[in-house]
Structures are given as structure tokens and as C-alpha cells.
Image (cartoon, rainbow, N blue to C red):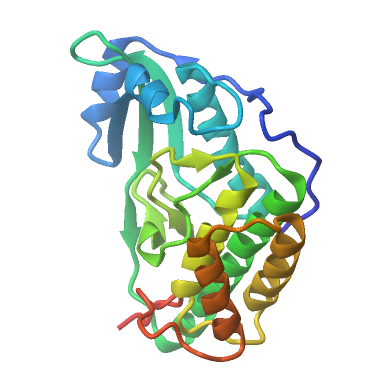
């Protein structure tokens, strides 16, 4: 996995493009039983992020930024999401962004395979923690909803014939931010979801480094974030949060 990052500006505009297709193409994709097709109105997307980001983005720029971030996860961090984005009009002829997601069929594992796949989930959480640390250091927009274990499925695409099995990020809604201050909340929830991760893992080390660099960067911290820092420090010292959400490493029972 490649972890060296280029410097980005926090209000950098995306440099990717999303294909425009006819409505008939969307209807064809919706009829494919191996795919899940979701849509969001471009107007709603723009309204959702108005005033929430550093810099103003049009709906098209937001969609293209989301695509760029999913592509970055795949190419730079080895986190694959089986999604393709398209622009078209919905059934009411309203301009929309469509996400086309491959359905993933989970697989049954033997005991030896369970151990191997558990290691892949350890690597996944290492990648997520590295992603947040890189964003703190380098700036730029980031996806905010990628650290919950229920958002990933270990299995194979129904559209593929070769039986290739992988961990896939199947929650492909575009939730993003570009303010470094927001990263603490994401790291906090990554730790909350981190039940089962070994305390000497790379993920834990990345969280430790993140906290140190975050506190150096931000001296004025809101009370709720001060409390999160306290809980994270306790977590790193070996204490449990008291109620983790779900285990980071699947039990495969």
C-alpha cells in the first residue's frame, strides 16, 4: 500500500470528471439484478454542503470530489469500493448523480481462512488510520463515513466471473469534509469501533501520532473535543471505552 501523499490545498477543486449518460442507460442499469443504483438530486447535494466546507463547490464539483476521494482510497490506501458514478436525469427529468454499486456476495470461511481474513481487516484499519493521519498532515478533502465495520463486506462481486474475493466498502454515499478540525471526531469513532484490534497494532500507533500532531496544530479545542481526547488517551493506555459499537475484526461465526 502506498502511503506517501502529495501536498493538497483544503479548498482544492477536483480534477476528475464524471460521465454523463442518457436516462435510458440508468434504467438499464436499474434492471440489472447484480447492481444497486442510488441517486441524489444535484440540487440537494449542493444544498447539503452549502457553507459546510472551506470553499464553495457546485453540485458537479461536489460529485466529482466524491469520486476523486473514492478513487484515492482505492489507489493509495488499498480500500476498494465497487462504485461507479454517473450524471443523468431521474424519472422526473431532474439532474441527478447516480452511484452504481456492485452487489457483493459474502463467502463462507474455513478456520484457516478466518485467520487470514482477520489479518486483512487489521490491514484495513491500518489503512483507515493512515488516511486520517495523512489528511491531518497534508490537508485536502476526505470521506467521513468509512470507519464502521458494517460498511464493509468480505466477498465477491456478483458481476465478476473469476471469483475474486476482497474486502469492499459498500456504503458509497458521498459524505465529505475538508476541515482538519473534523478529523478528531473520525479518529475517535475509529477507536470506538476498534474493539479487537491489538494494542501494538499500526492502527493504534497511527492514532497515537495523530493525537500528538492534532494537539500541536490546534491549541483552541472545543469542550466536546477535549473530552474525546481524554477518552482516546484512556483508550491508548489500555482502558476500554465502556461500550464499543461493533468489533473491528469480524468474528465470522
Q: Quadrant of residue 99?
A: top left
Q: Quadrant of residue 29?
A: top left
Residue 190 at least partly seen: no
Q: Could you tell me residue 12's position as x and y percent? A: 69, 27
Q: Is residue 244 left or right of residue 61?
A: left
Q: Could you tell me residue 1's position as x and y percent? A: 71, 59
Residue 36 at least partly seen: yes
Q: Is residue 174 left or right of residue 57?
A: left
Could you say which is closer to the camera, residue 234 or residue 59?
A: 234
Question: Which residue is at 66% across, 46% downward?
Answer: 75
The number of numbered discs placed on residues in the rendered structure image is: 0
Q: Quadrant of residue 86?
A: top left
Q: Which quadrant is home to the C terminus?
A: bottom left
Question: Which residue is at 48% across, 87% downward?
Answer: 112
Question: Which residue is at 40% across, 56% downward?
Answer: 156
Q: Could you tell me residue 229's position as x and y percent? A: 57, 71
Question: Which residue is at 49% across, 76% downward?
Answer: 194
Amino acid at each position: 500500500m502506498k502511503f506517501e501523499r502529495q501536498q493538497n490545498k483544503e479548498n482544492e477543486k477536483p480534477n476528475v470528471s464524471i460521465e454523463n449518460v442518457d436516462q435510458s442507460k440508468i434504467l438499464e442499469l436499474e434492471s440489472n439484478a447484480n447492481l444497486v443504483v442510488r441517486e441524489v438530486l444535484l440540487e440537494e447535494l449542493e444544498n447539503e454542503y452549502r457553507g459546510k466546507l472551506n470553499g464553495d463547490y457546485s453540485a458537479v464539483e461536489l460529485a466529482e470530489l466524491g469520486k476523486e476521494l473514492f478513487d484515492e482510497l482505492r489507489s493509495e490506501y488499498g480500500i476498494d469500493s465497487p462504485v461507479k458514478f454517473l450524471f443523468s436525469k431521474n424519472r422526473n427529468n431532474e439532474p441527478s448523480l447516480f452511484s452504481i454499486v456492485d452487489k457483493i456476495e459474502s463467502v463462507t470461511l474455513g478456520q484457516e481462512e478466518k485467520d487470514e481474513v482477520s489479518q486483512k481487516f487489521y490491514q484495513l484499519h491500518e489503512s483507515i488510520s493512515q488516511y486520517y493521519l495523512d489528511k491531518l498532515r497534508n490537508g485536502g478533502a476526505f470521506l467521513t463515513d468509512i470507519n464502521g465495520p458494517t460498511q464493509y463486506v468480505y466477498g465477491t462481486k456478483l458481476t465478476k466471473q473469476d471469483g475474486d474475493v476482497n474486502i469492499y466498502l459498500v456504503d458509497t454515499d458521498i459524505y465529505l469534509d475538508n476541515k482538519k478540525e473534523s478529523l478528531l471526531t473520525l479518529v475517535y469513532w475509529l477507536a470506538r469501533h476498534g474493539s479487537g484490534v491489538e494494542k501494538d497494532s499500526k492502527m493504534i500507533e497511527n492514532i497515537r501520532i495523530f493525537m500528538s500532531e492534532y494537539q500541536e496544530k490546534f491549541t483552541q479545542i472545543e469542550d466536546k473535543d477535549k473530552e474525546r481526547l481524554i477518552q482516546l488517551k484512556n483508550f491508548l493506555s489500555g482502558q476500554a471505552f465502556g461500550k464499543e459499537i461493533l468489533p473491528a475484526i469480524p468474528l465470522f461465526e
